[in-house]
Amino acid sequence: MGEVILTMKGIDKSFPGVHALDHVDLEVRKGEVHALMGENGAGKSTLMKVLTGIYKKDSGTITYEGKEVEFHNTREAQDAGVVIVHQELNMLGHLTVAQNIFIGREFKKGIRIDDKKMNEEARKLFDRMHIDIDPKETMSKLTVGKQQMCEIAKAISHEAKVIIFDEPSAALTEAEIEELFKIIRDLRDQGLGIVYISHRMDEIKVITDRVTVMRDGAYVGTLITKDCTKDDIINMMVGRVIYEDPKTKNMTPKGSPVVLKVDHLNAGKMVQDVSFELHKGEVLGFSGLMGAGRTETMRALFGADPIESGDIYINGKKVTIKSPQDAVKHGIGYLSEDRKRFGIVVQKSVAENTTMADLDEFSNGPFINKKKEKKVAEKFVESLATKTPSVDQLVVNLSGGNQQKVVIAKWLTRNCDILIFDEPTRGIDVGAKNEIYKLMNRLAAEGKAIIMVSSEMTEILRMSDRIVVMCEGKKTGELDISEATQENIMNMATREIN
Amino acid sequence: MANKSVSKTAGTKKSFVDRMGGQQFIVLIIVIVMFIFFSAMSPGFRKYTTVVSILDYSYYIALMAIGVTFPLLTGGVDLSIGTGLICYSLIGGLLVRQHGMPVAVGMIVTILIGVIFGIINGCLVALMDLPPFLATLCTCMITRGFGAFVVGGYGIPWPAAGQDGGWFRSIFKIQVGGQNIPIGFLWILLLVAIMSFVLNHTKMGRYTRAIGSNKEATRLSGVNVKFYHIMAYVICGLFAGLAAIAYSAIFATVQPGSGAGFEMDAIGGAIVGGVSMSGAVGNVTGTLIGVFVICLLKTGLPFIGLTANWQQIITGFVLIVAVLIDIFKRKKESGK
Amino acid sequence: MKKKVLAVLLGGCMVAGLLAGCGGGKEASSDNSSSDDSSSGGGDYTFEVVVKSFQSTYWQAAIQGIDAAKDELGVKVNTTGPNAESDIADQVNMLNNAISQKPDGIALAANDQNAVLDSLQDALDAGIPVVCFDTGVPDAPEGSVIATIATDNEAAGAVAAENMYPVIKDAIANADGQVRIGEVNQDATSANISGRGMGFINKMKELIEADGKTVAVIGNQFYVDQVENNGDEGSADVIIEVAVPAQTTVELSATEASNIMNKDDTIAIFGSNQVTAEGVLTANQNLNVLAATPDEGIVGVGFDAGATLKAAVADGTLIGAVTQAPVDQGNLAIHALYDYCEGKEVSDIATDSYWYDASNMEEDDIAPNLYD
């Protein structure tokens, strides 16, 4: 490890209503790989965006190569040698590898772009990285791993002194990760400062020299990797905060029947061989980090995405679910994580939204029985305590919590016995959250079976009777609430799968 | 997916068709087959004069299509070129006919107005973020009304071949020993060559494609995306202006209110020639070949005795097939 | 900074453009309107005129006649019309607007005979008399249309045939095999065009058969189906081939014309309106076959006028053409409304069509109808 090349001190950044970064520190030295860790929403990406000029900091200082700097856009940061390799690849699939690497700074001969020279230069970069990619190949024809290599080549070609890798391994195969690590070590040995953002605990141990941990937008601490254990890092990530009233025991009645059984479900990369059971009257929590494949599992189960293989049994009977219609027919209701896009039609009234999933029930031939629709909607407004002046109110005018209640009413109208709540309290304020929790508990007590996908640890621990943990498309654990702790859930959620 | 993927690098075997230019090559063969087919079916079609006529009627479509290839490559479209063409030609022609200006001045004005409308379209799309379809549909209506308004409803005949200023008609066709020589085709080939160069070997072209491929990534690479996005529409406007000259030179009278639908021939030609509606894929040589599919259909079908309704049905089917090929190719790419 | 100024300026231009565009959408014809209220001081009556379009110079000639009548009678006239004859809905809108102005009368050249029926009922209910000109509305509600002033299109088509036949008569009589006469019609839907087309076909057939030859009509089904006692294509002495382009563009008209003009046995061709006649001329640019007699090439006859057509008739490329009397029609329409308001009897008028060729183009009763 060499001298300090980059210091961020007391970085503070607020968005309306959110204190995203609260006096965060970060120090990167030449020739080190520095891990930046934290739960989803801990502020890692925000910090990097402040560094590369995408966001403007409210206060704090950034010192780079001994001078205080402030980059106004990615271009300025690039030119100074601070380059980010994005998680979602920023590539132009239709252009060639060399054209991608040199986009915006093409070599020219008069007005003609000198593609030959660009290919040569790209070849030199790849030689330096000891990898074999044809600079003339079209970008979209490369594997994701190779594309990542091109992104790195692009970063190096900027004469980068600090390279930030934002979850670089997320989409790579084992072999590709090996190759990536080799390149990263190479770069480190050449004296570059590397910031490495990842959730994979095992990777952190393998590749990084130091770890900085963030939690809830705040700086927690920096450790030397080889001197600490995985548990040390996890403890720092989840903190010692005692969350309010977690469930202590499984509330599901003994011997309650299995209403849903999912057996070796496969659907794309994000759902690999997932099996679980759901009992009547149970709240089954699905925990994991962003991109663990929880929502994808639910979408496949609901028929929104195609299932490749695996069986689904409802009340012991094998069923085929090819579309949401099939799922609804079998009594599955899905409350999407993105209400506005998938859950409700905001420009329609409460009553119209309530009956949407079951219009046949409310129609005489092609005509909708408005009176009946209104009566049923009013019943649910009352029983769910939805705050709306009338059922004719447009849903767009309701608060997030009340919108969620309308969606719940929609599925209850359809008499769904299995309800999937995907991030049920996202974007809902604290008071309303409690109401939704109470409602879910009541529904479970009434005999509905509930799956709750949540990224909030508090929510998982407070609501679930049992917990399924996923990581990178695979189920990595299943816990009864009585044995669940934040630590062991986080352990499973970041488990290296092998 | 990535687990299974085998690394694919240099030396991937390309099929014969791909090496010859992919869809372009197939479409070129289709053009040749169509020509042979129509020639075999109709003695009138295989005459030299018919070939000259086909070329005559293709110039303005080809020019529009070369231009519209640029907005298409950015993932947009320009629907205003058809009515625009008529509008620009009317205004230029009016200066010549009613205000006694030299034909050369009329031509320059015609092209300039095209460029101005290109700038307007570009600004609407690139600066104000209007969807291209909507923005250019609006300018389509504006040019249609504006052209008719300026000339007060009268059709404008640009000077005829024998008249004062009629020389400009020989830009596209000269007579040698009583025979018409369609030299306009040489201009088209030259322009295709120039625009091919621009598209494949200059920043302008590279960034046009880059915007169509991934606009945000292009912006993050430090490219002045707004400027190049506007320029795509300016080039389109410039070529609509050139198309207006070609139209005025071939046809006797320019009628206000017409022109709607011309853009479909041009866009259709580009798509048949392998330009993707979703941007980034395609080139101007493909566009030119595609235009000839459209032109051959328009000329050939009447010659083999098919009536109006059949011509429209068949042309519609050809476009559906072309678009389906585009969609199929995209699916194959994203699903790899 | 400069860039920003430029952007703002451009933005301003565009907003202005958009506003203009929107305004145009609502009242599409105000730009085109030729109303001139100030000049006709103290007119007792106000008339609304809705023409088919401002596209063709033909309608500009009709407006000349309307303006002449306006000045002569001292009435107020407001003229509107859509951008193109195919903008049927626009025209109905304009007609409804005209009715809501509560004028003393309306002169209408309907683009679609069925689309205007409801509006005509409204006019009748509002007590507004309507004169149809150029095109009649056969199914109009009883009493709504007080008079129809239109070209007898069948007769107009016949005029073309009568003047073409003497030139090709000998060629038909002396032909070794079949000979072919072409006709290009813009469409097979409007009553005017089809009337004209059939008028030509029937008269030509009658003239040829009177000289003892047989005729077969082929091509567009709409026209072929209306021919009585159609001959057999294989054995007939004369073929009349009818073509209709897929769209009403000069280019497609020219393609259809080329197809016919390319055939070795073709001796004559007729383009039955301005667009198709220009199509014949465009095709001839490359074919160069039009001539004064069948011995030298193909005899061409046009319809309507316009600078291009007039030039072609004047230099003999076309042996002649038929013109309607748009000036008269416009004039007579206003006169009919005026007379009706004055309590006089009005009745339908079939206006004449005129044959014009290089020799009579300048004559007083022809020249005013030959618009540019």
Image (cartoon, rainbow, N blue to C red):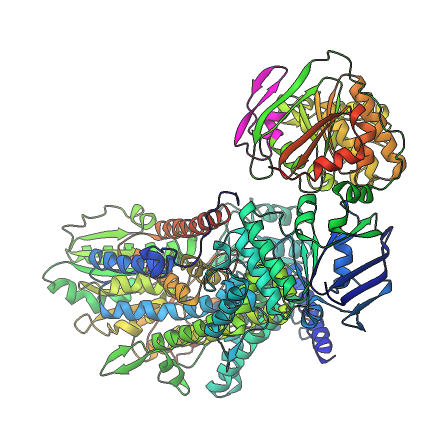
Residue A144, position in %: x, y? 54, 51
Taking B194 as reference, is C337 above or below it? above
Q: Is residue B7 left or right of residue C267?
A: right
Does the magenta run of residues contain A307?
Answer: yes
Q: Nearer the viewer, residue B167 or A267?
A: A267
Quarter occupied by residue C285 = bottom left
Residue C72 visible (yes or no)? no
* Residue at figure coordinates x 64%, y 15% from the top left: A315
Q: Please tell me whether residue A31 is drawn above or below residue A439 in the rendered image.
A: below
Residue C192 visible? The answer is yes
Provide residue B302's location: percent of width, then percent of height.
Answer: 30, 57
For the point 80% across and 23% down, which residue is it?
A482
Q: Is residue B122 left or right of residue A115?
A: right
- Number of numbered labels in the structure image: 0
Identity of the residue drawn at 49% across and 54% down: A142
Q: Nearer the viewer, residue A420 or C114?
A: A420
Q: Residue at x 38, y 81 (%)?
A: B171
A434 relative position to C155: left or right: right
Taking the image as shown, residue A104 lies to the left or right of residue C135, namely: right
State which region is magenta. A301-327
User: Residue C92 placed where, x, y %?
Assistant: 59, 53
Residue C258: % across, % down: 28, 65
**Magenta includes A437?**
no
- Give C261 or A304, whichever is nearer the viewer: A304
From the viewer's perspective, is residue B272 above or below residue A495?
Answer: below
Q: Viewer-proximal residue, A425 or A397?
A: A425
